């Protein structure tokens, strides 16, 4: 029989990076073992209406490419089944009714206004093998009689979770470490239902730079936000796969198909995993660099089209844009970096970045001399990358300074910023001489 795994999120209105890692590890286990991947929405607690809370979740899973084989199933639709199990436990006196003061109440029929508690056996040890954490044990004396049915007529999470796993024939429950402490209660419920127990794998906690658990308040935890900031889905899943797992050959940045081939849930380790934004950026930059040009252009569309771009549509020049793609693709960390690298070409004037101006014009020596020398040299030189580079180098040499320092005020005059695409190529291939000279002279008057 092949494995059946499930991703069972409680909807929160967005897909958290920790949840996405859980979704991914379940998906990887299913895909690498030829098993079945089931999506179950654990919405018994959800107060808001279903499409609103789950549509984002589903589209973000699709964006990540984590397609499911069965579902989505909605736990809230199984309420009658959950009720039946609770009633059966009451009938067998494995559970009892209790009132609003937590006092046991006689009788064994589920009733409005009364909750149901599971009767914890005394002095038993509950032990299980967790794939990640090894052998785990709890004693029932440390656990309370826990509520399985609320007085408002709805099932509690652990009950619904246990019943659904049993009914769906789930063989593996791969999920976050925060759920570990609920396992003994779920095992008791499964035992009472005479259902087999799934294999558990609890994934390590995700922590931020301060080694604190990732939180919505402090950290960027929404997958949709990363998507909107220009991260690629293949980079996202690649990075998430490294949170608690690593490939045996230590090659970390690679396509998902290879990760599927190499992944084994047994190789996940239990140490807390640092959600490292710098590393995520690096992984993203690497995947961005590797995109074929057509693909890059297609995926970059939302960042260079529409009303968020700083230039007006009639200023945009497709040929120049495509040339710029060749020059900047390897420099980007995210797609949202792209407009900043090319905007000055499609604007009437260089952008106005006061810090850059201060650094390259006000603080640096010889800015005026460099601008003047460059203006003169560019007036009649051949308009071609190597020549432009040579003449600017010469201007610096006459003043006794290196090209890097000579280039800075020229770059700020032309683009407005100290950081940007390769300057001489950009000037030669995507700007006219007249435009460049105008910008240099504009900077001269401003100085
Ligand atoms: N619904 C639970 C959560 O989102 C996960 C339950 C499970 O994976 O067993 O925290």
Image (tube, rainbow, N blue to C red):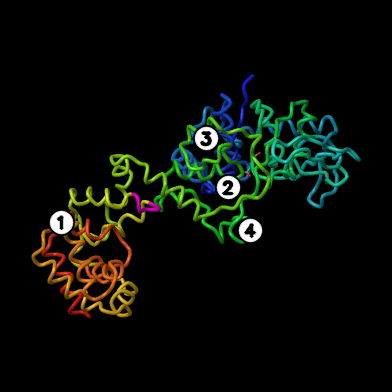
Indicate which disc, 4 or 3, sits on the residue closer to the N terminus: 4
332 in magenta = yes
Query: What crowding class fits label 2: few (fewer than 14 Cα within 10 Å), some (14-19), or many (20 or more)?
Result: many
> What is the magenta range?
330-334
Q: x%, y% of residue 412?
A: 26, 69
Q: Residues within 10 Å of mark 4 (few under 14, many from 20)?
A: few
Q: Which secondary structure lies at badge 2?
A: helix
Residue 142 is inside the magenta segment: no
Please provide percent x and percent y for residue 9.
59, 41
Q: Which residue is most to the left?
A: 380
Q: Say if mark 2 contacts mark 3, CB within 8 Å.
A: no
Q: Quadrant of residue 210?
A: bottom right
Is the residue under label 3 in contact with that under label 4 (CB below 8 Å)?
Answer: no
| Residue at disc 3, secondary structure | helix
Residue matched to label 1: 384
Q: Report whether 284 appears left or right of 387.
A: right
Alpha carbons under labels 2 and 3: distance apart? 19 Å
Q: Which residue is mark 3?
A: 259
Most common SS among magenta residues: loop
Q: Quadrant of the N terminus?
A: top right
Q: Which residue does the numbered mark 4 point to in the structure image? A: 211
Q: How far apart are the alpha carbons under marks 1 and 2?
A: 50 Å
Residue under pointer 2: 18
Number of numbered labels in the structure image: 4
């Amino acid at each position: 029989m092949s494995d059946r795994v499930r991703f069972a999120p409680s909807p929160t209105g967005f897909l958290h990076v920790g949840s996405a890692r859980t979704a991914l590890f379940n998906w990887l286990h299913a895909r690498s073992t030829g098993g079945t991947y089931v999506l179950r929405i654990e919405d018994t607690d959800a107060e808001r209406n279903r499409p609103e809370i789950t549509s984002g979740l589903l589209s973000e899973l699709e964006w990540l490419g984590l397609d499911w084989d069965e579902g989505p199933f909605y736990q809230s639709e199984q309420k009658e089944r959950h009720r039946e199990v609770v009633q059966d436990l009451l009938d067998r006196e494995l559970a009892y009714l209790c009132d609003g003061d937590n006092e046991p109440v006689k009788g064994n029929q589920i009733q409005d206004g009364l909750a149901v508690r599971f009767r914890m056996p005394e002095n038993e040890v509950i032990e299980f093998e967790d794939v990640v954490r090894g052998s785990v044990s709890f004693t029932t004396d440390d656990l309370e009689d826990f509520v399985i049915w609320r007085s408002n007529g709805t099932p509690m999470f652990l009950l619904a979770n246990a019943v659904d796993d049993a009914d769906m024939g789930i063989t593996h429950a791969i999920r976050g470490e925060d759920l570990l402490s609920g396992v003994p209660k779920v095992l008791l419920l499964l035992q009472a239902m005479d259902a087999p127990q799934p294999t558990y794998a609890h994934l390590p906690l995700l922590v931020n730079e301060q080694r604190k658990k990732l939180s919505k308040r402090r950290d960027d935890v929404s997958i949709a936000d990363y998507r909107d900031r220009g991260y690629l889905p293949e980079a996202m899943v690649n990075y998430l796969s490294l949170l608690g797992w690593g490939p045996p050959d230590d090659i970390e940045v690679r396509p998902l198909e290879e990760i599927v081939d190499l992944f084994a849930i047994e190789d996940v380790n239990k140490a807390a995993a640092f959600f490292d934004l710098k590393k995520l950026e690096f992984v993203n930059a690497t995947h961005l660099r590797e995109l074929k040009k057509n693909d890059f252009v297609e995926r970059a569309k939302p960042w260079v089209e529409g009303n968020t771009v700083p230039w007006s549509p009639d200023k945009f020049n497709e040929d120049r844009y495509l040339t710029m793609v060749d020059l900047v693709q390897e420099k980007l960390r995210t797609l949202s970096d792209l407009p900043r690298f090319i905007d000055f070409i499609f604007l009437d004037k260089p952008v106005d970045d006061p810090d850059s101006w201060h650094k390259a014009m006000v603080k640096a020596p010889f800015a005026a001399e460099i601008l003047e020398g460059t203006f003169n040299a560019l007036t009649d030189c051949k308009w071609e990358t190597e020549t432009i580079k040579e003449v600017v180098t010469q201007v610096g040499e006459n003043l006794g300074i290196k090209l890097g320092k000579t280039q800075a005020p020229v770059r700020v005059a032309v683009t407005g910023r100290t950081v940007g695409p390769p300057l001489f190529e950009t000037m030669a291939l995507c700007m006219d001489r007249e435009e460049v000279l105008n910008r240099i002279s504009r900077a001269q008057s401003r100085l």
